[in-house]
Image (spheres, helix red, strand yellow):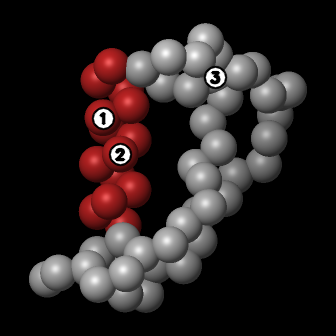
Amino acid sequence: MAIESVHFFGPIVSPPPTGDESLALWNVLTASFELPSFLELKRGRRDAVAFGPRP
């Protein structure tokens, strides 16, 4: 099934994942876009945002 148009905000991940963890997160997100009924996934923030190093 081809995805015609997908727009999303996020994810907000703190600290941001790298390497295999970032690929795993991307795979979960892109798989969720294939479900037409998927609308939102949200979890409360427990700690302050920790920005990682910029590439």
Q: Amino acid at mark 3?
A: Pro
Q: Disc 2 marks which residue?
A: 26
**Distance of mark 3 from mark 1, alpha carbons?**
15 Å
**Could you say where residue 47 lies in the image, as x and y percent from the top left?**
83, 27
**Distance of mark 1 from mark 2, alpha carbons?**
5 Å
**Could you say where residue 53 lies in the image, as x and y percent from the top left?**
61, 12
Q: Amino acid at mark 2?
A: Trp
Please determine whether, in this image, residue 14 is positioned above or below residue 24.
Answer: above
Tag 2 secondary structure: helix
Contact between labelled residues 2 and 1, with CB atoms less than 8 Å apart: yes
Count residues near mark 3 (Cα–Cα under 10 Å), then give few for <14, some for 14-19, many for 20+. Answer: few
Disc number at residue 23? 1
Please determine whether, in this image, residue 39 is positioned above or below residue 14.
Answer: below
Q: Disc 3 marks which residue?
A: 15
Farthest residue to the right: give it: 48
For this view, does 3 lie left or right of residue 13? left
**Distance of mark 3 from mark 2, alpha carbons?**
15 Å
Q: What residue lies at 26% left-to-right and 79% top-to-bottom?
A: 3
Q: Who comes first in sequence, dot 3 or dot 2?
A: 3
Q: Amino acid at mark 1?
A: Leu
For this view, does 45 lie left or right of residue 1? right
Count residues near mark 1 (Cα–Cα under 10 Å), then give few for <14, some for 14-19, many for 20+. Answer: few
Q: What residue lies at 29% left-to-right and 23% top-to-bottom?
A: 20
Farthest residue to the top: give it: 53
